[in-house]
Image (cartoon, grey):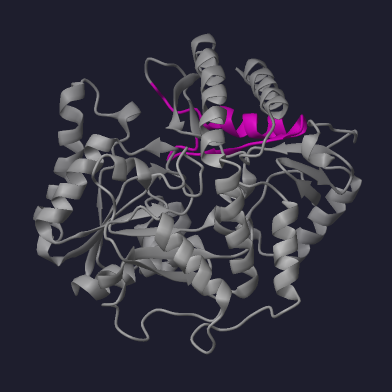
Amino acid sequence: MLKDELPRIITDTLPGKKAQALIDRRKEATAAAVGCSYPVAIARGEGAMIEDVDGNYFLDWIGGVGVLNVGYCQPEIVEAVKEQADKFFHGMFNIVTHEGYVAVAEKLNSIAPVRGEKKKTFLTNSGAEADENAVKIARGYTKRPNIIVFSGAFHGRTELTMSMTSKKAYAKDMGPLSHGVFRAKFPYLYRKPEGMPDDKVIDYYIKSIYDVFEECASADTIAAIVVEPLQGEGGFIPAPIEWVKAVRKICDDNGILLVADEVQSGFCRTGRMFASYYWKEAGCEPDIMATAKSIAAGMPLSAVVTRAEIMDAVPAGTIGGTYGGNAMSCAASLKAIELMEKNHLADRALEIGQKVTARYLALKEKYEVIGDVRGLGAMIGLEFVKNKETKEPNPELVKALVAECAQHGLLVESAGIYGNVIRFLAPLVITDAQIEAGLDIMEAAIAKLS
């Protein structure tokens, strides 16, 4: 079966003839701004493997950028969607009540690590929608206009979430952007100020929040502080727990809501059902959680979860939408979460993380171009530099590495504010043999290019 195969390229060139023909049609018919540099036209997928239209097998370490934690085409999820399709595709939730929406909300309320005994959930379609609605809900509850986000953050491509996103290449020619969005420094410990003692670092980054209060907007105008527990596009940088504790205290002292953006880090990826379980274990859980990606195994769905008093304070009519909580997506979500729990995918993420991190650390010792290895569970970043002493970013090598790996059947993606990080987001159903095969391809590519 495809899910058990290893990478195998059978065409003389990549893309092959059929893939090239489809890619050419894509260029003629679709928006160039979406972008894609991979030589792959998918025919089918199983587990962590893709077969392209020419019969090549690719090992996928991108997983739809975190969407496919349960893998491609889990048979039980396929059946759940088919069963729902026989009943109805869609029932707009402000017109009719349907079982799927209510059941997904009940499940998320029971597993989301947000503060409060009674919780409520609002379903949307995408990660950006979840983040934007998390802000709207925070504003509706606090009656305050402003928010704080961080350097390196990625929250989406709507007008508000483009404003929240740090990298302004994602907002080129899109201004004016939304007002009331202010930015503090995220604790990127590998690139802390040169010479700064370790015992001063957390205070340095926390001070940047107080600088926002002083220079941009007073604390009593801030509705929410929005944090990725582990920055995705920013370079797979975990938020240090001591820093999160300090942010939580700032929020509590000033009537500010703490929002966890778990769009990419949720659903077992980091070794917990949600990365903010690590926060909860340290006594600093968020007030609101936004999540998406692997929530429904590839079907469009996202969610905002918070305690009931916050959700119930939202003015009527200010949140909603046609497709949010679509019945097909809800069917996929319920079965996906069931499989995550039944198959202990959070534990598997920890196992995968240990294997990959151990090999990455060995590569770091061997190659001057690897500066840092970091992450949580099976969400791991490998940062490339021109040399370890200067830490000068090496995006050119990463770009070449992505292309070289693809030529040998391994799909990896870059990240980071400098474009010099390789991210590991393989489906958590990946086999040990596939992990080793991928690591071998990765090491061979690093050896060749460095």
Is 230 on the left or on the right of 413, as rendered? left
Q: Residue at x 14, y 50 (%)?
A: 250
The quarter of the rendered structure image containing the C terminus is top right
Can residue 73 be seen in the rendering of this structure? no
Tell me if residue 398 is in the magenta stretch. Answer: yes
Placement of 263 over or under 442, stated as above or below = below
Is 403 on the left or on the right of 384, as rendered? right
Q: Which residue range is magenta in the image?
A: 391-419
Placement of 381 over or under 246, stated as above or below = above
Placement of 20 over or under 420, stated as above or below = below
The quarter of the rendered structure image containing the N terminus is top right
Q: Nearer the viewer, residue 341 or 167?
A: 341
Q: Residue at x 15, y 27 (%)?
A: 200
Is 23 on the left or on the right of 247, as rendered? right
x%, y% of residue 69?
60, 46
Is 194 on the left or on the right of 328, as rendered? left
Q: Nearer the viewer, residue 21 or 146?
A: 146
x%, y% of residue 206?
17, 41
x%, y% of residue 313?
26, 77
Give the quadrant of residue 334.
bottom right
Q: Residue furthest bottom?
A: 95
Tell me if residue 244 is in the magenta stretch. Answer: no
Can residue 142 be seen in the rendering of this structure? yes
Placement of 275 over or under 22, stated as above or below = above
Give the quadrant of residue 164.
bottom left
x%, y% of residue 387?
45, 16
